[in-house]
Image (tube, grey):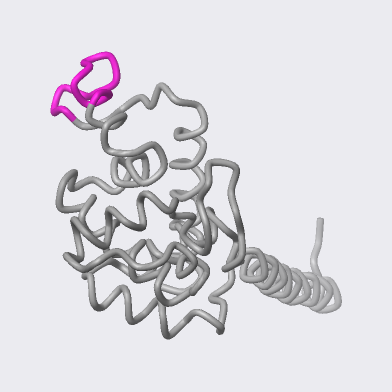
Amino acid sequence: MKFNARSFAIIAAILVLSIGFGFAFDGVATAIEKNRYPLSPRYIQDIRGAAAEYGIPEVIIWAIVRTESNFSSNHEGENGGIGLMQLTPDEFAMIQSDILHVTPEDKGLLYDPQKNLQCGTAYLSYLYQRYGVWETVFAAFDAGTAAVDAWLANPEYTTELGTLQNIPNAKTARFVRDVEKARELYTKLYF
């Protein structure tokens, strides 16, 4: 097969168009992902403030809030969780008294985004200090420390190094998987 100048021009045009369509497709795909995993302007300052105050990577908070409530500060979950980070009234009181060392406030403040983010992030910080592995922190955030401690004590659920490998609770396993996916996408899109 013999190529002439016209053949090269056609091939070059096809390559240029292919590259252009590729960039356009990447741009559309990124826009779709950013729409599904946004940095909600309404909460940027509160999330950044809580991340800085408690030494938690901002991306972790975005992933938790996206997974727990999809940015609805009025969200009420099936397990009794309320607000952006889906804290229960009992968790809210425990975080305030045992972690923040303040007198527990009215549970109605769980609907306040700033208070919910502050308490939820303080709890994440506590859990990270306790477990040191984000996947285990996410499991404890969902199932509680008693359940995670029991799983960690069972060699059927841990690695040789004693870290959580298998989560026997399907809801918690799904939650950890969803938070990890959100963390990966937020990292790719923004951080």
Left or right: where 14 falls relative to 34: right
Left or right: where 63 falls relative to 54: right
Q: Position of residue 140 (x, y in %)?
A: 32, 41
Q: Between 52 and 109, which is closer to the camera in this rendering?
A: 109
- Does residue 73 sit above or below 97 in this rendering? below
Q: Residue at x 39, y 36 (%)?
A: 143
* Membership of 135 in magenta stretch: no
- Does residue 43 sit above or below 148 in this rendering? below
Q: Between 133 and 25, which is closer to the camera in this rendering?
A: 133
Q: Position of residue 52 (x, y in %)?
A: 26, 78
Q: Residue at x 51, y 70 (%)?
A: 189
Quarter containing the N terminus: bottom right
Can you tell which quarter of the image residue 42 is in? bottom right
Q: Position of residue 158 (x, y in %)?
A: 24, 23
Left or right: where 52 falls relative to 179: left
Q: Residue at x 42, y 67 (%)?
A: 116
Can you tell which quarter of the image residue 66 is in? bottom right
Magenta-tinted stretch: 150-162
Quarter containing the C terminus: bottom left
Q: Position of residue 17 (x, y in %)?
A: 78, 74
